């Protein structure tokens, strides 16, 4: 489930980096890896350098979550989603608030349920992680009326 915005962002970054316009991502642009209940995670992606670095790093993590919302009939990255992660038996493994549109999770293969909440709207996704097959899941919240135009 990949949004058009996500694909455009990725190709834009690839093209700009290839032309020498953008520096390639480096580890110093990454937020600190955190841990809760034995699960390592990395959350962020605010700003071009950080989002480029996290996107490159995501290939090394078993699960990448990407958060966006419809604004003015377009999908835009969003931060501050409240995230709960449960195992296949319903046991709560992680509960946190995302610091940006990306959330990388270091998990063992298995079945998980992710519940993400933004502005009171809950989205849920069942995820099956297989060994050696990183997964990427995009959460897109429906458009919410707002008085302000979206900022990219």
Image (cartoon, helix red, strand yellow):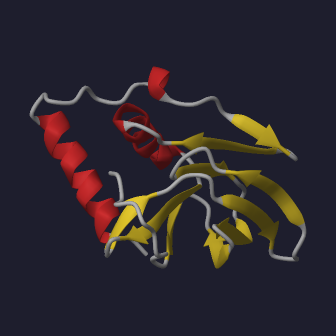
* Residue 121 position in % (x across, y down): 64, 76
- Which quarter of the figure has residue 38? top right
Q: Is residue 75 visible?
A: yes
Outermost left residue: 19
**Residue beneath the point at 47% across and 20% down:** 28
Q: Is residue 134 visible?
A: no
* Residue 110 position in % (x across, y down): 73, 68
Outermost top residue: 28
**Residue beneath the point at 51% across and 30% down:** 30
User: Viewer-proximal residue, 94 or 132?
Assistant: 94
**Residue beneath the point at 88% across and 77% down:** 89
**Residue beneath the point at 71% across and 60% down:** 83
- In the image, is residue 151 above or below residue 42? below
- Which quarter of the figure has residue 4? bottom left
- In the image, is residue 132 above or below residue 28? below
* Residue 46 position in % (x across, y down): 46, 40
User: Viewer-proximal residue, 117 or 115?
Assistant: 117
Where, quadrant-wise, is the N terminus in this rendering?
Answer: bottom left
Q: Relative to 48, is 68 on the left or the right?
A: right
Tally of numbered tags: 0
- In the image, is residue 149 above or below residue 39? below
* Residue 105 position in % (x across, y down): 65, 51
């Amino acid at each position: 489930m990949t949004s058009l915005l996500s694909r455009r962002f990725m190709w834009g970054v690839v093209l700009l980096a290839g032309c020498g316009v953008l520096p390639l991502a480096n580890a110093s642009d990454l937020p600190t890896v955190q841990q809760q209940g034995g699960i390592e995670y990395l959350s962020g992606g605010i700003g071009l350098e950080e989002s480029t670095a996290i996107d490159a790093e995501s290939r090394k993590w078993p699960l990448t979550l990407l958060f966006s919302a419809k604004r003015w009939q377009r999908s835009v990255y969003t931060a501050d989603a409240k995230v709960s992660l449960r195992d296949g038996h319903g046991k709560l493994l992680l509960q946190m608030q995302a610091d940006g549109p990306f959330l990388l999770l270091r998990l063992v293969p298995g079945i998980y349920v992710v519940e993400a909440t933004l502005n009171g709207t809950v989205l849920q996704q069942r995820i099956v992680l297989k060994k050696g097959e990183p997964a990427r899941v995009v959460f897109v919240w429906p458009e919410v009326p707002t008085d302000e135009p979206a900022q990219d």
